[in-house]
Image (cartoon, rainbow, N blue to C red):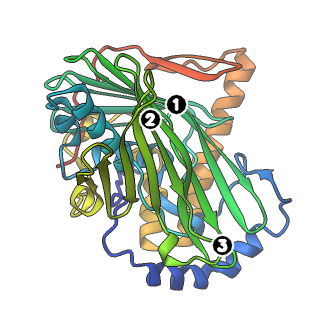
Amino acid sequence: MEAKIVLSKPLAFEGQSDSDANDEGANILQRILSLFKNIRQESDLSCFKLPPAFNMPKSQLQCYAESVYCTTSNLLSRINSGKTALDRFISVVAWSISTVRPLRFGVAPYNPTLGETHHVSKGNLNVLLEQISHHPPVSALHATDDKENIEMTWCQFPVSKFYGTSIETKVHGKRQLKLHNHGETYEMNSPNLVIKILPVPGTDWAGNVSIKCLETGLLAELSYISQSFFGFRAGQRLVKGKIFDSLSMKTLYKIEGHWDSTVTVKNTTSTETRVIYDAKQVTFGLQIPIVKNPEGVWPTETALVWGELSQAIMSKDWEKAREAKKIVEERQRVLQRERESKGENWIPKHFIVSSGKEGWDCSPIQKLVPNAPIITL
């Protein structure tokens, strides 16, 4: 039987009202509580296997990649065209906020298999991800735009813990964006994903994000503020912060807004306020990626590895979904036993990887990411 290449709809904001999310959450709350009833509080969930009914039809690799290539505005080009270092830095802050996407309550992406890849092109931007470790689950990303002379690398891994009434996923690792035309490198981290089970089910992003330009000394500190315990709307999806010069410690701009609507910056000198990010404008009308060249798709492509399972989930054929997931997991166990019997260590194909006390680090082997057989408009 020919393997299926299945890509699902990108995560976006349209059609996801808070009332709908709460109704949906109420419908599956009991199933989630029963799923976690035997798990101790503050337990690490990195090895916990979800039944297919709790999976969205995509891998975590695709979720990471979508936050980079699924935009209807060319934010990277806007960054590159900034006339001053400060203009470019403000655009980098807006781009960083754009990588935060909503997740539906009650479903989670697949934990990628070792060596799984995702390779997609959007215009001149070519994006490649590889799962460089399975336990712990570590993902590496490399993206290049040869026209804009822009490059980004991510190396990060999520650690999820259950706290009785909520699950928090801390996304460890570093994200780096390089503007080669300007000789500027920006480093940043990710906020944490919070899944609240009680009293009001829902998902949110929370925690502190630091964005810094190594060459100019500009620094932004953002706080993603989770909604209140009882889920009052006024406290949902807030982001606040400031941009300042790390050398003089002078605050240049204040940042405030909601990452699912608009975010503004206010000049501390002139009090001028302007919108730097509009979520609806950036993510409205996103299209599912297209397989332009099926013969060029690698066997490790996430859309192929999980194709049967994703198709079954979208069709709500849960018996077929359970069987498809079992096949993928058993294939991985067989490959692991074969490596162990030969005394072989798995080596990533697209990244040079190291790990130590300061975490994981990965460097892309190729200078430029090649054009992909999967494209998005």
Determine contact: label 3, label 1, CB under 8 Å: no
* Mark 3 surroundings within 10 Å by alpha-carbon count, few (fewer than 14), some (14 through 19), many (20 or more): few
Q: From the image, tell me which residue sits under label 2.
A: 300
Q: Is residue 305 left or right of residue 76?
A: right
What residue is at 23 percent from the left and 51 percent from the top?
272
Left or right side of 220 for 340? right
User: Residue 9: horizontal and vertical position, in percent?
Assistant: 33, 61
The spot of residue 11 in percent (x, y) is 37, 59
Residue drawn at x 70%, y 16% is 342
Read off the residue under disc 3. 229
Q: Amino acid at mark 3?
A: Phe
Asked whether the viewer can see residue 2, the reply is no
Instruction: Choose the circle earlier in sequence order: 2 or 1.
Output: 1
Q: Pointers 2 and 1 in contact (CB under 8 A)? A: yes
Helix, strand or loop under label 1: loop
Residue 115's tag is 1
Dot 2, how many residues are within 10 Å of its Cα: few (below 14), some (14-19), or many (20+)? some
Amino acid on which the number 2 mark rests in the picture? Thr
Query: 101 or 114, which lies in front?
Result: 101
Residue shown at 48% from the left, 49% from the top: 59
The CA distance from mark 3 to mark 2 is 41 Å
